[in-house]
Amino acid sequence: MGRILVGACSWTDRALVSSGWYPAGRRDAAGRVLHYAERFPVVEVDATYYGLPGERTSRLWTERTPDGFVFDVKAFSLLTGHPTRPAAMPPGLPADSRGPRALDEVWRRFADGIRPLRDAGRLGAVLFQFPPWFRPGERARAFLAQCAQRTAGWPVCVEFRHPQWWRDGQEQATADLLRAHGFAAVAVDMLQTLPSAVPPVTPVSCERLAVVRLHGRSPHWGTGGKEDRFRHEYGPGELDEWAPRIRALARRTEQVHVLFNNCCGDAAVRAAARMRALLGG
């Protein structure tokens, strides 16, 4: 049976910080990450999607958290084909942010930024969450192959947001594609009545790792403001649905990361705590 690590998709989210979950004396940068790490063994870093990580910051994360605590790092937006703010790009690069020179530099800086985590053995995985328009096909397969070349030696997990990857007989081909590159598949929980809903399948494409990301079941997913998209309280019945699936993943992999992304107030950390208790700690 593999280890099951349960946590949340951020420890710095503004709504969490303002919720009162962090006690007095633990509200500065060092106190927050330590308070979180004393309660959970894994966290997802979502800030690296919006801006490139810095080596000093990654080093501080390792120094401020206990041995064994791991960080799943979300890939920078440009690396997954998302729109990227010009202000998030390193200065001095060409105006065409997707040109070869700019892309090479962004990859280099991203790799440098997470190196302290890799060197310390604290990098759980790099999450490549692809946009809803990234659909199965030759161009997508070529893009994934390029990502595999760039990330050789890294632990990588992949979340597809176009539902076709896991529907209509495509499931095995998708799992085989990820397996060929050594990528772990990400299972997703979200409201299933939405047209864009990714089905809650739990494929295993890597012996080392499986990842489950629970986004909440808001009907406003993909629309409205952040508070609307992620406002959801996971009830006992919903968590009960996932517990046997997670245990089944743990029987087939060395480690399972279960990450709650319903980051609205302290809903994610409370759901993570309930899931840990449900799974036996």
Image (spheres, grey):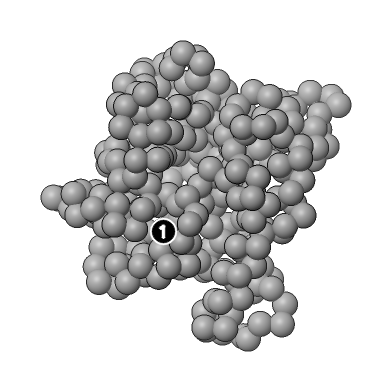
Which residue is outermost to the right? 25
Residue displayed at 29% across by 37% down: 202
**Res. 242 in view:** no
Residue 180 location in percent, x, y?
Answer: 29, 57
Give the residue at mark 1: 130
**Res. 261 in view:** yes
In this rendering, would 194 be left or right of 124? left
Which residue is outermost to the left? 169
In this rendering, would 263 be left or right of 179? right
Residue 26 location in percent, x, y?
Answer: 81, 29
At mark 1, the secondary structure is loop
Q: Is residue 275 above or below residue 117?
A: above
Residue 259 location in percent, x, y?
Answer: 49, 35
* Residue situated in front as seen by the camera: 247 or 85: 247
* Residue situated in front as seen by the camera: 188 or 267: 188
Image quadrant in which you'd find residue 145: bottom left
Quarter of the figure that contains the N terminus: top left
Q: How many discs appear?
A: 1
Q: Is residue 165 above or below residue 72?
A: below
Residue 208 location in percent, x, y?
Answer: 40, 40
| CA neighbours of label 1 inside 10 A, class few (<14), some (14 to 19), many (20+) | many
- Which amino acid does the dot numbered 1 rest on? Phe
Residue displayed at 42% across by 49% down: 157
In this rendering, would 198 be left or right of 39? left
Residue displayed at 61% across by 59% down: 50
Residue displayed at 46% across by 61% down: 152
